[in-house]
Amino acid sequence: MKVKGEWPVLKDQEVLALLPELLLEWYDRSARVLPWREDPTPYRVWVSEIMLQQTRVEAVKPYYERFLEAFPTVEALANAPTDRVLKMWEGLGYYNRARNLQKGAQMVMERFGGQVPASFEELRSLPGVGDYTAGAIASIAFGLPVPAVDGNVLRVISRVLCRRDNILDPKVKSRMEGEIRAILPQRVGDFNQSLMELGATICLPGGPPKCLLCPLNQVCRGYQEGVALELPVKTKPKPRKKEERTLFLLVSRKGRLGLWRRPEQGLLAGLWELPGVEGKLNQEQALAFLDSKGVKAENITQGPKTKHIFSHVEWHMNCWVVRDVEESAEFTWAGTRELRETYTLPSAFKGYFPLVEELVTG
């Protein structure tokens, strides 16, 4: 590592002005081959950017291909049954993204003649599309000169300029968007992607950045001063709330699983789930609850305990397994084929999937 003082003293904007050439040269050599980069039409870019929100690239790849095969056009997505859209999203999590994507497709059909709008402001008006996503679609798909500042970009620029501003402060992000807007090159889509690519593959979060491999190491103040790992600065998140839940794995005499829908608002809104209630119910309480739902539980055993972590809450789940029950109208009953093809069970319940596969035969 070079010592402090061997680099010329440059103003922030002078440092930033050096980035396009350095990053584009590196990007042309090193960019990952990704399915959404092969044919960056507006719809394909839009789908990819929504999927990539809060989800790693490697996790998105197979879902992206499957989703586009099922819904190859905006029109196909707009007209699809919502349950089918959610089924194609199953396993990706954050299901509101899928709901908003479909609502956006319907809006594109109704307001924009079926064409994804080539305007940052109009893109921004679509459900689930914020400043970053609108900037990414606008620049990558349409070549519009707008920045796309996500967590990767905030981290890269904070390290390059050795800034200790809180990157979770909207004012900090807004300032950085303005600074990047001033240096956007003609290849704006590639440049925005190069910044994100650097943050995803070299200027890493949560561990040592690969500074020796970085194309910006000769202009990076964080590297020069040996403090890159300390950056960026962000406020600590509030501790996640912990919630106890009791689930019921109900299997009917026909070998089918009892499900119900979650409320249309809130966590996992509108998705199917294993029936459950807040709190930890003992057997007597569990039997009383089932009786209130028209289920006579003569074969009830304690099931496994599991945990699922959401961004702001942890579910600590207990389970009662109830076999050979009559199919109460309080629940929707699904056999193996329906579970495979129709009903979307969120990954919050994946700890119970092996047991479901074992018990459900209908």
Image: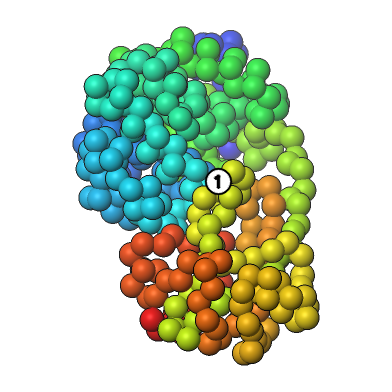
Toward the viewer: 318 or 297?
297
The quadrant of the image that shows the C terminus is bottom left
Secondary structure type for disc 1: loop
Q: Quadrant of residue 287?
A: bottom right
Number of labels in the image equals 1
State whether residue 309 is above or below residue 326: above
Image quadrant occupied by the N terminus? top right
Q: Which residue is mark 1?
A: 264
User: Local crowd at mark 1 within 10 Å, few (<14), some, or many (≥20)?
Assistant: few
Q: Nearer the viewer, residue 139 or 334?
A: 334
Residue 215: x %, y % from top left:
43, 32
| Most foreground residue, 60 or 122 | 122
Q: Residue at x 49, y 26 (%)?
A: 130
Q: Indicate whether 307 appears above or below 36.
A: below
In this picture, residue 69 sits left or right of residue 204: left
- The amino acid sitting under disc 1 is Glu
Image position, residue 281 (x, y; %): 76, 73
159 to the left or right of 202 = right
Residue 166: x percent and y percent?
Answer: 70, 27
Residue 173 lies, with reference to residue 105, above or below; the image says above
